[in-house]
């Protein structure tokens, strides 16, 4: 487990290929993800799975939102990029932060719980041999995408987690110098 944590690395979505997780593997990945810290057991998050043609339908939503929300008229190349965005990986999971109004459970704690779910999702998929990349990108903040995905008023996209088989592994990137980010009290 320590070796997996020490060597964990996101893989660029352009470096994914099939296969992605099978149905039973995805169920296990999401079950593990949901075993995250969750004050008062609110489950202030949920998942939307994009696979098969669902990835292409999402791309049409992205292109339509791009046309409406961009200040300048997007080029055909840009719209094609948006249409193909989720096709870069065999599976994409949208992690939706779903804040509950609950006395004694601040929104911040619920947001952090969604973050923990996302990291557990990545770790579970990585442990099964799949690569992951957690991105937000502009669509996570798009009102048109939120409406098309039927997000409730207190919901927002915490990220899109791309999952698949890597075509190659990336070199590690520089990490923080622990001596620069740790203090003692």
Image (spheres, helix red, strand yellow):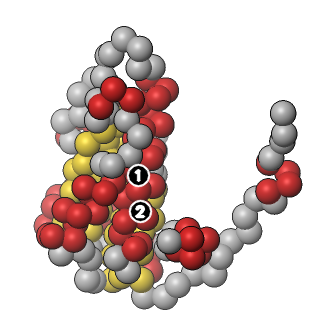
Between marks 2 and 1, how big is the CA–CA gap? 6 Å
Q: Which mark is residue 122?
A: 2
Above or below, 126 relative to 72? below
Above or below, 172 relative to 56? below
- Total marks in image: 2
| In the image, farthest residue toward the top | 103
Q: Would residue 15 appear left or right of 143 to someone viewing this image?
A: right
User: Quarter of the image holding residue 126?
Assistant: bottom left
Residue hosting label 1 = 118
User: Quarter of the image holding residue 121?
Assistant: bottom left
Which residue is rendered at x = 31% and y = 57% of the image?
32
User: Quarter of the image holding residue 19?
Assistant: bottom left
Above or below, 47 relative to 6? above
Which residue is rendered at x = 57% and y = 76% of the image?
3
For the C terminus, the quadrant is: top right
User: Can residue 52 be seen from the camera position used here?
Assistant: no
- Picture coordinates of residue 177, whole percent (x, y): 81, 59
User: Can residue 1 be seen from the camera position used here?
Assistant: yes
Which residue is rendered at x = 84% and y = 39% of the image?
184
- Picture coordinates of residue 26, whole percent (x, y): 22, 66
Mark 2 crowdedness (10 Å alpha carbons): few <14, some 14-19, many ≥20: many
Mark 1 crowdedness (10 Å alpha carbons): few <14, some 14-19, many ≥20: many
Do residues under tags 2 and 1 come within 8 Å of each other at their CB atoms?
A: yes
Depth check: give the residue in front, 68 or 6: 6
Q: Which mark is residue 90?
A: none
């Amino acid at each position: 487990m320590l070796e997996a944590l020490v060597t964990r690395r996101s893989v660029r979505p352009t470096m994914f290929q099939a296969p992605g997780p099978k149905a039973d593997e995805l169920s296990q990945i999401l079950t593990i993800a949901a075993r995250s810290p969750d004050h008062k057991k609110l489950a202030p998050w949920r998942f939307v799975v994009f696979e098969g043609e669902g990835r292409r339908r999402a791309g049409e939503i992205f292109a339509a939102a791009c046309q409406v929300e961009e200040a300048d008229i997007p080029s055909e190349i840009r719209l094609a990029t948006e249409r193909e965005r989720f096709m870069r990986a065999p599976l994409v999971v949208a992690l939706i932060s779903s804040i509950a109004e609950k006395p004694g459970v601040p929104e911040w704690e619920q947001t952090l719980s969604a973050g923990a779910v996302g990291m557990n999702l990545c770790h579970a998929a990585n442990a099964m041999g799949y690569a992951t990349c957690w991105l937000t990108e502009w669509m996570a903040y798009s009102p048109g995408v939120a409406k098309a995905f039927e997000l409730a008023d207190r919901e927002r996209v915490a990220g899109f987690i791309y999952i698949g088989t890597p075509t190659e592994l990336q070199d590690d990137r520089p990490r923080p110098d622990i001596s620069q980010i740790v203090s003692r009290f």
